Image (tube, helix red, strand yellow):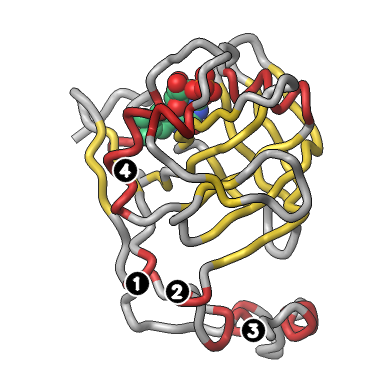
């Protein structure tokens, strides 16, 4: 079946990340973002696509900071309360009944109960007529101990990352499952050696 080109997210599951920011006056804001991706392995950049009328965008422009909060499927009920447009002076942690997790490197707080947090500083913005790509540099990355295991693997069966599929009338929420199939990065390279392997050893969890 052929689909209209704009229906990309009807065939591509998207992560639902909650972006938390703080306005220059200290008002806390949260918004769900599905258009988000890391920029290549092993860089520390993350890119989000944003429409132009977003408090999130204004706050990132004003403060140069944001947190990407990765949530489990139990946060599905928090998507609409944080996606509704509220005046910029309303505290969206309070509206959504969410508690903050103080950040280590930036002022904007994260969200308690998520399974991972990326504290980001604005790196670059790419602006077009009706959207902006925001690139953030991850300055502090943290994961809940109970979902992070040996070999740097996040257990998705425990974390149950919140994701969505678009459909004609709305969003269907879903998660991912571990298939139990593993391939080393080295398998992509001629001598079976991952040129970035040393970085992962140096950065391995304690
Ligand atoms: C599941 C989901 C994913 C979304 N993804 C994006 C996105 O990637 N980019 C965007 O600009 N808006 C996205 N939105 C819309 C914003 O979350 C929504 O407009 C929100 O009110 C923005 O809040 P803010 O003005 O406080 O930043 C998404 C909404 C939902 C429900």
Q: What element carries label 4?
A: strand
Q: Distance between the residues labelled 2 and 1?
A: 6 Å
The answer to whether the residue bearing label 4 lies less than 8 angstroms from the nearest atom of ligand 1 is yes
Q: Quadrant of residue 82?
A: top left
Q: How far apart are marks 2 and 3 (CA)?
A: 25 Å
Give the residue pinned by disc 3: 186
Give the residue pinned by disc 2: 147
Q: In this view, does 151 lie to the left or right of 58?
A: left
Residue displayed at 29% across by 52% down? 74
Q: Distance between the residues labelled 1 and 4?
A: 18 Å
Q: Is residue 33 above or below residue 188?
A: above
For residue 164, the mark is: 4
Between disc 3 and disc 1, the foreground one is: 1
For this rendering, which residue is in front, 78 or 130? Answer: 78
Q: Distance between the residues labelled 3 and 1?
A: 27 Å
Residue displayed at 27% across by 40% down? 77
For this rendering, which residue is in front, 20 or 96? Answer: 96
């Amino acid at each position: 079946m052929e689909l209209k080109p704009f229906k990309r997210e009807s065939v591509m599951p998207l992560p639902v990340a909650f972006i938390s920011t703080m306005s220059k006056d200290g008002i806390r804001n949260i918004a769900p973002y599905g258009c988000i991706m890391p920029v290549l392995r092993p860089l520390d950049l993350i890119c989000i696509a944003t429409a132009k009328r977003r408090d999130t965008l204004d706050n990132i422009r004003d403060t140069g900071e944001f947190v990407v909060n990765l949530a489990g499927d139990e946060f599905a009920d928090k998507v609409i309360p944080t996606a509704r447009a509220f005046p910029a002076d309303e505290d969206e942690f309070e509206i959504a009944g969410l508690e903050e997790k103080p950040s280590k490197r930036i002022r904007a707080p994260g969200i308690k109960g998520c399974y991972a947090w990326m504290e980001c500083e604005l790196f670059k913005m790419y602006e077009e007529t009706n959207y902006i790509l925001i690139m953030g540099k991850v300055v502090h990355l943290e994961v809940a101990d109970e979902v992070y295991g040996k070999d740097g693997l996040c257990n998705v069966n425990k974390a149950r990352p919140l994701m969505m599929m678009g459909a004609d009338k709305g969003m269907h929420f879903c998660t991912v499952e571990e298939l139990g199939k593993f391939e080393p990065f080295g398998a992509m390279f001629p001598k079976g050696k991952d040129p970035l392997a040393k970085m992962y050893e140096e950065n391995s969890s304690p």
